Amino acid sequence: MPKKKVERVFEQIRRVRGLSVEEKWLFAKTLAATPDERWKMHENFLRSHGLFTRSGRRKFGFK
């Protein structure tokens, strides 16, 4: 994902109240991403927290 695109979206949401800079940056990153990139970020998040497999999710109480 191009950094310039993320920065452009970040500038558009810069004045949103109630969000920290880190939250705005993450939000801009997800808004600038394509659907495939968002899916990849979602899968990486699940893998990094051990929730990618069904057995991993069941350990944490997900059905």
Image: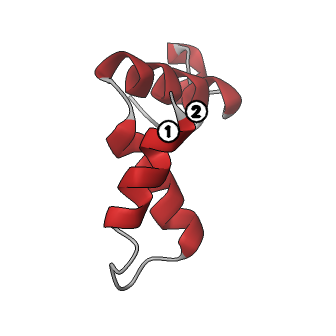
The residue that label 2 is drawn on is 45
Q: Which mark is residue 51?
A: none
- Crowd tier of the residue under label 1, counting other residues whose Cα lies within 10 Å: few below 14, some 14–19, many 20 or above: few
Q: What's the colour scheme?
A: secondary structure
Residue for point 33% across, 24% down: 34
Looking at the image, how many numbered discs can be counted on the residues? 2
Q: Earlier in the sequence, mark 2 or mark 1?
A: 2
Residue 61 or residue 16, whichever sits in front: 16
Residue for point 40% across, 52% down: 8
**Please, is residue 2 above or below residue 9 in the view?**
above
Image quadrant in which the C terminus is located: top left
Q: Which mark is residue 61?
A: 1
Q: Is residue 52 left or right of residue 49?
A: left
Amino acid, disc 2: Phe
Distance from the alpha carbon under mark 2 to that under mark 1: 18 Å
Where disc 2 sits, the SS reads helix
**Please, is residue 53 above or below residue 31 in the view?**
above
**Please, is residue 60 above or below residue 41 in the view?**
below
Residue 12: x, y in percent? Answer: 32, 64
Quadrant of residue 19 within the rendered picture: bottom left
Amino acid, disc 1: Gly
Residue 36: x, y in percent? Answer: 37, 16
Where disc 1 sits, the SS reads loop
Residue 33 or residue 8, whichever sits in front: 8
Circle nearer the viewer, 2 or 1:
2
